[in-house]
Image (tube, rainbow, N blue to C red):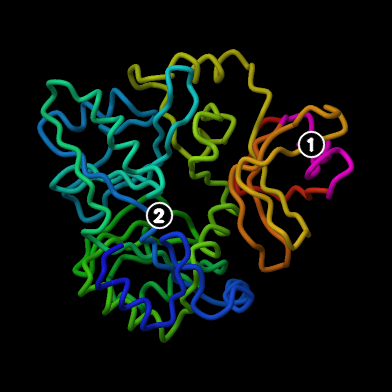
Amino acid sequence: MNESWAATLTQHGAQFCDGRVNTYSSLATELAATCDGTIFCDLSHEGLILASGDDARAFLQGQFSNDVLALTVGDEKNNAQWNSWSSPKGRMLATFLMWREAQGVFLQLPRALQPAIQKRLSMFVLRSKVKLEDRSDQGIKLGVADRDVKRLEASIHEGLGVTGAAELIPMQTLDSPLGRIIRLSPHRFEIITEVKNALIIWQKLSTIAKPVGAAVWEGFAIREGIITILPETQDAFVAQMANFELIGGVNFKKGCYPGQEIVARTQYRGILKRRMAWVHGDTATLPKRGDAVYAPEFGDQAAGQIAQIAPSAEGGFDALVVAQLESINANSLRLTNIHGEVLMIRPLPYLYAA
């Protein structure tokens, strides 16, 4: 994390754990704030890789699931995309938020994966004119979210004072005097900026929104059904198992990339037996990413696993679970074993075939 920025966050009461902001006040207070107001979050736990050079876009196009060549730059409003990198067996090794700027293409992913992914990706550059750089600490990333879309847009307009930011559609970006603004969804924005501008943004937002820890921010992504691959879930899911094509993270018309044959076969042969569901559990003790879930239909055999988890404002936790469609449709998922706590399935903002 940028040292001067970390000092600023500490002055505002930030409590850190494992390199990310845990809370500013109390988790219960911050979770409650998501029910009736706007929140904002430091995203320094997200790493950044800059891919630059004459061959950068073509190189990334041959590695990732989405159409990197479709990323635009230079207009007032450009686009971002969800993307993923898979093993030859089609299992996702990393997921990215990607956007393009004049200096190249930025890949945002968890810091827990960034060094290893950058190193592994570099092995495939060979003689291509591509440079991969760690830019994780050279900018500040802030997230702004609200369950109420209109209130969020008003907060963005008032907090940033940037014309047009509130009018962005999901996965559209805007280059503003305060930095790059990306609308991730109807309910979330991300701002990538310099430290001096981050201080201005913080001062403005703190009058109309509440700062929260990373877990609260992740709760919004869970409600939106957007997975982030972490070390516990690397090489576990084909893209469609994690609903990645449903959020625009897979382009089926582009050329080859590692795992493309498996992803295409899964799509067109109808062999998908697992999907991702948003579930709620009432236990106060949070399970862990990668923990197995069960269902009576499968007995002692795991029916799936937890891909993402965060505490819920309703108490207990919300999670994204990749599980057997049969068990999702039967609403029969359980923690620990077939007699464990019931996991209540909640509706995602998109649909998939039952």
Residue 159 at what x, y percent from top left?
A: 35, 78
Residue 185 appears left or right of 3: right
Q: Residue at x 46, y 74 (%)?
A: 15
Q: Amino acid at mark 1?
A: Tyr
Magenta residues, start to end: 324-341
* Quadrant of residue 160 within the rendered picture: bottom left
Q: Quadrant of the C terminus?
A: top right
Location of residue 102 with respect to 311 vertically, above or below: above
Q: Nearer the viewer, mark 1 or mark 2?
A: 1
Residue 17 appears left or right of 166: right
Towards the viewer: 329 or 195: 195
Q: Secondary structure at mark 2?
A: loop
Q: CA distance from mark 1 to mark 2?
A: 38 Å
Q: Residue at x 39, y 67 (%)?
A: 42
Residue 63 appears left or right of 130: right
- Residue 169, numbered circle: 2
Location of residue 208 with respect to 70 vertically, above or below: below
Residue 198 at what x, y percent from top left?
A: 27, 72
Q: Amino acid at mark 2?
A: Ile
Q: Which residue corresponds to mark 1? A: 294
